[in-house]
Image (spheres, rainbow, N blue to C red):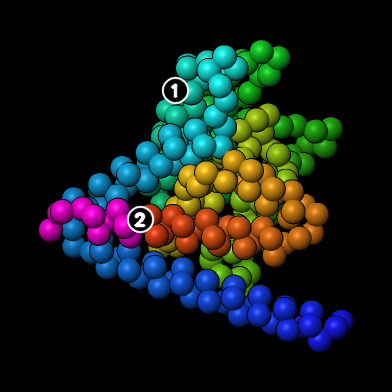
Amino acid sequence: MTSQKKISQIAHKRHSKDKCACIEHNKKVINKLLSKNTTKRLNNLNWLRQKISFEESKNLFYMPNNKQSPYFDYSCTRGLGNAYDYIIEHHDIEKPLSLSDVCQIHYLICNQANIQMNDSFIRAGVINQTSIPMEIENQLENIIFQSTHNDKKTFFQAFDLHYQIILLQPFDDYNKRTARMVMNWYLIKNGYHPIAFTKKNDKTKYPESLLKMKQNHADFYYEYMIQSMLHTQTEIINQLRALKIY
């Protein structure tokens, strides 16, 4: 390895370390801004609900009106909103994430009903079956355990959980939406705030980061996820400081 490459790697690690420290600092700032103010907390929860259920889905999945029906847009938003409400109501830190939790989130994202779209049929909350009984269920349980029982920082565990669920593709569809909601639940359970992918370039950068991870370019994926988390934290802080509620 050349000395220049070594220097570059050291600089990258230092840069990533600084960003991780910034995430922890922002977490403290947000908690302080929300402390002892129930109205602000409720306002912030509703603001994040709008970001995740509407703005994020519109940003990542939007298609022209002639290609996507308004009903599908509404259905998608409502399902994500229901799933968001669920993770807010069930984020008790004492209860570890389970296989049934992941299935419940998918069930809610599907609006608690099976979906028939053109040639696609989505079974709400039902894991795909293979010729080997319980194969995908066991893999998903293993992903949950391995992603959340290691020495990594909590948000890196959440990033791993998100990617591994998408890689496994346990459901007929809506795997990415489910993975993002599960990731956000894990973040919330551990005292962080959820990530909303609402930047204009997320429509291309989000799938690109997943592809890079699959191609063993983990640094690209983690860097993108860290940037997305920092962006959401900054938006939360700005939103809270703009509120005239004391």
**Quick one: which residue is furthest to the front in this view?**
4
In the rendered picture of this protein, how many numbered marks are placed on residues?
2
Q: Is residue 51 left or right of residue 146?
A: left
At label 1, which amino acid type do we have?
Tyr
Q: Quick one: SS at disc 2?
A: helix
Residue at x 66% of width, y 13% of height: 118
Mark 2 to mark 1 CA distance (whole Å): 25 Å
Dot 2 corresponds to which residue? 236
Q: Is residue 168 left or right of residue 21?
A: right
The residue segment tinted magenta is 236-246
Picture coordinates of residue 121, whole percent (x, y): 66, 19
**Quick one: which residue is furthest to the left in this view?**
246
Quadrant location, the C terminus? bottom left
Depth order, front residue of 179/218? 218
Depth order, front residue of 104/204? 204
Mark 2 against mark 1, which lies toward the viewer?
2
Q: Could one spot residue 108 in this view of the protein? A: no
Picture coordinates of residue 15, whole percent (x, y): 59, 76
Q: Is residue 112 above or below residue 9?
A: above
Dot 1 corresponds to which residue? 74
Q: Is residue 242 magenta?
A: yes
Q: Is residue 67 magenta?
A: no
